Image (cartoon, grey):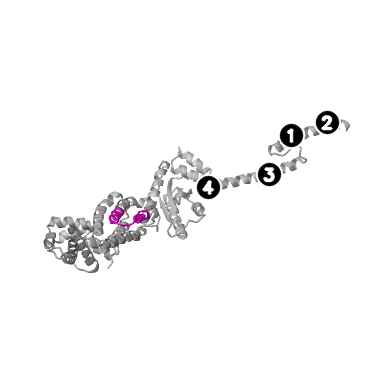
Amino acid sequence: MLLLSIPCSLLIIYFTRKHVKPIKELQQSIGVPTNSGDGFLAIRKGIESLIGQNKALHTRLDESKPAFKAAFVKKFVKCRFLTRESAVNFASGLGINIDRTYFCVSLIAAVNNAGNMLERFNALISEEADVDGCGMEIVEQEQYLFVLFADKREGLVSWANAAQQLLSSLDKEAVIAVSNIHVDYSEASRAYLEASTAYDNRFVMGNEDVLWFSDIASTAKDMEPFTRGYLESFRKALHAGNARTLNDRINDLFQILRDKKFSLFAFRIIYKEIISMLLNKYLSYDGVSIDMLHYYDTFELSRCRQVGDLVETLRQLCNDILIIEEQNACECSSVIRQVIDYIRENFTDPDLSMGAVAEKYGLSASRLSLEYKEVTGIYPSEYLLLLRLEKAKQLLANTTMPVKDVCTAVGYYDSSGFIRRFKKHMAMTPAQYRTAVKNGKIQYDT
């Protein structure tokens, strides 16, 4: 026994040292002192400490995920990923599967901006089984930018419709604009510009539905014929000082913009001309306040959500001009004032001509024309045309009188000439105008 005890002791010492060494190494690896009492107890405490540290690390990572997602969105829409694979891998690290066939970009804005808006829409993405993606807040523009990915186009359309429903429940004035649906990641910047363009058209197209870039079919070229005719008729109404006509022209403008869904870019062409025309007219009077220039700021399109937002301000500016026009009427040449009154009283007479009017007041036709324009801003023949066309609109809207009879009633013998002038002025024929009023597409205030 004595002989056996010696080798047994040696074996015990050997195995003890063999197992103690890795235990000490494990203690050192988890930051536990090697001279602590119970090695196994110390290891257990060390592991518990590591678990706590790991949880804290995961918490910090979760908290920083929105920042990483925002970085991904920015990098993606700026086409900063050199390859599709690099974009897929970056997103995968955030738990987002973008390795899908289709993608689109969406811009969302709400007036009553809830604090958790971004979280709500990210949650909406997770609820759509066929869609993945993420978003970020663009603070300076008061917008949210999302990139969405799906294997089917229908999935992206479904998400957009669901987002619109959610928006409507949160804010009736909220807007969601979506780009075309793309396949190539290198078109991400283009997709963002498409969404931005669709968003810019919110006040023309309304915010009741999703604003798809694909729905914006009109271009500035489509607007040009209407613009030229409209601006000319608006200018004549403005210089004639006819409040009713100006109001009708404003109604015509916004009705046509709604019906034809002109793009915002196209609308800017005409809107800037109108504002410039109005302000030049206003500031041409002595003693007026330059405070009126605030109207131009009010008309900044980025502050408008729909066409109707512009109507009252435009009318107010017109009314202010007409008030000043009335105040300055006393300064008008007595002869020109008499000419204005005479034309107004006799415009339905087919035999009324500028030569006859000039002769009545002892002037040549050319001198009357120049003096009249110098005082009023338009030629007397233009004022006569304006009065006749406004009377024609009244008869077309409120009676069933045939177009030929309307022509005669407003002072024209030639119906074809009347129709040609009406179409140039209104961008539609008399019959089309009557139908538009009847169907509620154009409002005529009786």
Mark 3: amino acid: Ser
Q: Residues within 10 Å of mark 3 (few under 14, many from 20)?
A: some
Q: Is residue 5 above or below residue 54?
A: above
Quadrant containing the C terminus is bottom left
Residues shaded magenta: 274-298
Q: Marks 4 and 3: in contact by CB < 8 Å?
A: no
Instruction: Determine which residue is flagged by label 4.
Output: 66
- Mark closest to the chain's N terminus, 1 or 2: 2
Q: Nearer the viewer, residue 328 or 215?
A: 328
Sequence-wise first label, 3 or 4:
3
| CA distance separating discs 3 and 1 | 22 Å
Residue occupied by mark 1: 21
Residue 427 seen in the figure? no
Residue 417 picture quarter: bottom left
Marks 2 and 3: which is nearer the front? 3
- Label 4 neighbourhood size at 10 Å, few (<14), some (14-19), many (20+)? some
Q: CA distance from mark 4 to mark 2?
A: 65 Å
**Upstream in the sequence, badge 2 or badge 3?**
2
Of tags 1 and 2, which is closer to the observer?
1
Instruction: Report helix, strand or loop for mark 4.
Output: helix
Which residue is tagged 2?
Answer: 7
Q: CA distance from mark 1 to mark 4?
A: 45 Å
* Residue 119 image point, x, y percent: 51, 53
Q: Main secondary structure of the magenta part?
A: helix
Q: Position of residue 79 (x, y in %)?
A: 43, 41
In contact (CB < 8 Å): disc 1 and disc 4: no
In this view, the residue in front, 356 or 17, is: 356
